[in-house]
Amino acid sequence: MGRGRQKAKQTKVARELKYYTPATDYRALEQELKRGGVATDSTTPVDEDDDDWAEDEG
C-alpha cells in the first residue's frame, strides 16, 4: 500500500530536478570569465596516476 505513495514522491522529486532552472547571474559570469575564472586555477597540481575508476592491473 505504501509503495504507490513512495513511487509518486520519487517521480515528483525527479521531475522537479529535471526541470529545475536556477537563476543565472550573467553579469557575475561575465566578470569571472574576463578575469580568468576560478575554475582555471593552475596552481593546483593534477595527479594523473590517481584514477579511482581505473582497472586493477594485476
Image (spheres, helix red, strand yellow):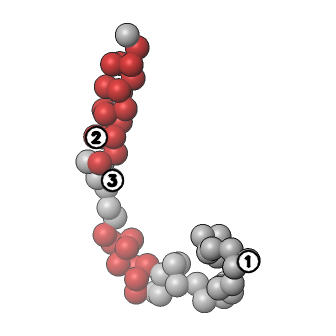
Q: Quadrant of the N terminus?
A: top left
- Disc 1 target residue: 58
Q: Quadrant of the C terminus?
A: bottom right
- Disc 2 target residue: 15
Mark closest to the chain's N terminus, 1 or 2: 2
Mark number displayed over residue 7: none
Is residue 58 rendered to the left or right of residue 7? right
Q: Within 10 angstroms of label 3, few (less than 14), some, or many (20 or more) residues? A: few
Using the numbered discs, state the Cα–Cα distance from disc 1 to disc 2 in whole angstroms: 43 Å
Q: Secondary structure at mark 2?
A: helix
Nearer the camera: disc 1 or disc 3:
1
Using the numbered discs, state the Cα–Cα distance from disc 1 to disc 3 in whole angstroms: 46 Å
Q: Is residue 15 above or below residue 35?
A: above
Q: Is residue 24 above or below residue 6?
A: below
Q: Secondary structure at mark 1?
A: loop
Q: Within 10 angstroms of label 1, few (less than 14), some, or many (20 or more) residues? A: few
Q: Amino acid at mark 2?
A: Arg
* Residue 22 placement (x, y as % from top left): 33, 53
**Which image quarter: residue 56?**
bottom right
Mark number displayed over residue 22: 3
Q: Are marks 2 and 3 in contact (CB under 8 Å)?
A: no
Is residue 35 rendered to the left or right of residue 50? left
Q: Secondary structure at mark 3?
A: loop
**Which image quarter: residue 3?**
top left
Q: Are marks 1 and 2 in contact (CB under 8 Å)?
A: no
Mark closest to the chain's N terminus, 2 or 3: 2
Q: Name the one closer to the observer, 18 or 54.
A: 54
Q: Amino acid at mark 1?
A: Gly
Nearer the camera: disc 1 or disc 2:
1
Instruction: Identify the residue shown where x is 26% and y is 48%.
Output: 19
* Residue 34 placement (x, y as % from top left): 40, 86
